[in-house]
Image (spheres, rainbow, N blue to C red):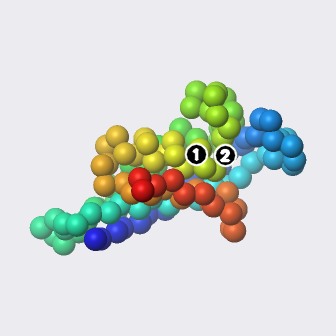
Amino acid sequence: MFRVKVEGNFSAAHRLRGYLGKCEALHGHNWRVEVVVSGKRLDRCGMLFDFSKLKARLREVLENFDHRYLNDLACFKKCNPTSENIAKIIFLELKKKNPGICAVTVWESENAAATYSKE
């Protein structure tokens, strides 16, 4: 099995509804997003997936989050904009055009991340 990974980032604000603690208040992060694609076969050039195409598709998805108040987005009206839910939403958006997506990890700080995968 081959796996390739690209990274992107976005900056946004959010608050966690119903959470008792500092994160209930409005605050922001500079999120880093890792996307992993897996597959068994390489193309005729010896690549699983073109890095530039994967980066471009990730940028398209992240533009919807960048410099936004995440709580205002339709996808977060019923669920909190946690790192876990952000990872899941990015995964599902990318999966629409890229069936090989196997995992999305969202880092909200240098030492805290959440991953959503197809497993």
Residue visible at 27% across and 63% down? 39
Mark 1 is on which residue type? Ile
Q: Quadrant of residue 48?
A: bottom left
Residue visible at 43% across and 42% down? 92
The quadrant in which the C terminus is found is bottom left
Q: Position of residue 82 (x, y in %)?
A: 67, 46
94 horizontally vs 30: left or right: left
Mark 2 is on which residue type? Thr
Residue visible at 28% across and 71% down? 1
Q: Is 9 in front, or is 87?
A: 87
Q: Position of residue 99 (x, y in %)?
A: 30, 49
10 horizontally vs 100: left or right: right
Q: Residues within 10 Å of mark 2 (few under 14, many from 20)?
A: some
Residue visible at 35% across and 60% down? 37
Q: Is 92 in front, or is 57?
A: 92
Alpha-carbon span between mark 1 and mark 2:
6 Å
Task: Say if mark 1 contacts mark 2, CB within 8 Å.
Answer: yes
Q: Is residue 10 above or below residue 92?
A: below
Instruction: Label 2: state its secondary structure.
Output: loop
Q: Position of residue 57 (x, y in %)?
A: 39, 48
Q: Is residue 51 above or below residue 98?
A: below
Can you tell which mark lies on residue 15?
Answer: none
**Residue 15 can be seen, yes or no:** no
Q: In this figure, what is the number of numbered marks?
A: 2
Circle 2 residue: 82
Q: Residues within 10 Å of mark 1 (few under 14, many from 20)?
A: many
Q: Position of residue 31 (x, y in %)?
A: 63, 55
Seen as rendered, the residue at the extreme front is 119
Circle 1 residue: 86
Seen as rendered, the residue at the extreme right is 21
